[in-house]
Amino acid sequence: MKRVWTIAIVALISINISQAGKLTKKNLQKHVGFLASEELQGRFPHSEGSQKARDYITKSLMDSGITDIYIQQGKPIRPLPRHGAFPTFPANNIIAKYPATTATDKCIVYSAHYDHGHKNPKKFFPGANDNASGVAALLELGRQLVVNKIQTNANIYLTFPDLEELYINGSPSMVKHLLDSECKEIILNVNLDIVGGAFFAGMEGHLLELSSGLTADHYQFIDSADKHGLNIHSSNIYLIEPLGNLVPRSDYSSFRASGVPFIFYTAGTPWYYHTQYDSIDKVDFDFLQNVVFRIYSLAKNYSVHAPSLTNFSYNNDQTLNLAKDASNFAEILQIYIDNREQNHLTDRQVKRFSKYIKKFKDPEFKATKLKLHKSVIDLIISVKSSGKYFSKSSTGTK
């Protein structure tokens, strides 16, 4: 009889997990569906669509049970490339707080920009993957924290920076505000940008985990968090920054500039990146659901490990493991050429990427930042160029 009850309990738990997954997926579809809808016209900064996105995000947070929400306005600090002028309107950054169980000045800050950077009267750029996917993930994270009544040893902030697409002009003032007014110490920033789809054919279910400034204590609680079926590729952030700090890829850079350790989660820039084809049909909601569970595990795991972990300061003295990063990137390149037909690779391209793979896997090869940068740029350009094949048969908004 005891065995029957055990089986029944396991079955009940499985049903509850399945039902929770269905609800999360449904919520993600709802969030991305609205944010990437034609009604918002791409969420270009300082537009009517941008205001609607802010209203939707704040209402969704309140509906989930998070009520400490406000808009932090910040002045742009960087001139726009090729224009030499600063944006003439302020950034409207959304900040929401899920409080720690006991009073503390330590914080974990999640971030996902809600703007999209293309305003074209002739073409509608939905921005479903970039970055409605990241926003939806944070909205669902907030609901999960409240529903599961997570007890934390750090205040958790869900932030939605503005003006990311305008040369990252929203998050600098937001980070300064958080450090000046909310958090004595931000122990970690988790930044999400383009987390709804595969970089290229064969990379379904794969997530890049790029970081800088982490200590051994950071790695301990990050590595023990559940991966939830994701294939996670870890590397130092330099891998995707050809010119270092001069060309940051997302809002994590504002945290880094203030000495805050960070993780940047992204699936990479697919062929439809910054085009009118970045529509909801490109989003893999099963994958996005697993991303939510991953970042939820991070929040939960910090509280489990915090009592025995103390060093969460920015680690300036990091030894880059170039050989390891080269080997890891070789695995990504191998996936790319293994799916050459789906990725529309020519014999010449396969030959070039095969040479990279051979070099990066050679234990005698002396990897350098420059050599790795070149291979990353080649891959990004190659993926982008394949758009001429995919767009012909795309079912996305045109």
Image (cartoon, rainbow, N blue to C red):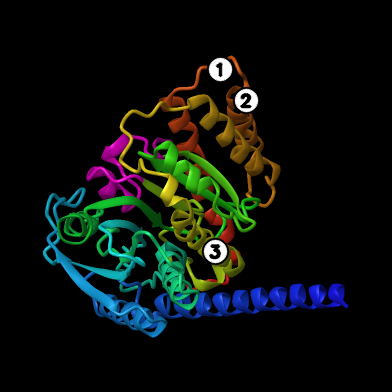
Front in this rendered view, residue 46 or 179: 179
Q: In the rendered image of this protein, does residue 168 appear above or below residue 113?
A: above
- For residue 44, say whether it is visible: no
Mark 1, Cα crowd under 10 Å, few <14 / some 14-19 / many 20+, is few
Q: CA distance from mark 1 to mark 3?
A: 38 Å
Front in this rendered view, residue 2 or 77: 2
Reply yes or no: does residue 29 show up in magenta: no
Q: CA distance from mark 3 to mark 2?
A: 33 Å
Mark 3, Cα crowd under 10 Å, few <14 / some 14-19 / many 20+, is many
User: Measured from the top left, where is residue 143 in percent x and y?
Assistant: 45, 76
User: Measured from the top left, where is residue 237 in percent x and y?
Assistant: 40, 40
Give the numbered dot on residue 293. Answer: 3
Q: In the rendered image of this protein, does residue 177 appear above or below residue 306?
A: below
Give the numbered dot on residue 361. Answer: 2
Name the element at disc 3. helix
Reply yes or no: does residue 244 show up in magenta: yes
Give the numbered dot on residue 365. Answer: 1
The residue at the point 56 percent across, 80 percent down is 26
Point out the stretch of residues depicted in magenta. Answer: 237-261
**First of labels 1, 3 by sequence position:** 3
Front in this rendered view, residue 316 or 220: 220
Q: Amino acid at mark 3?
A: Phe
Give the numbered dot on residue 247. Answer: none
Q: Amino acid at mark 2?
A: Lys
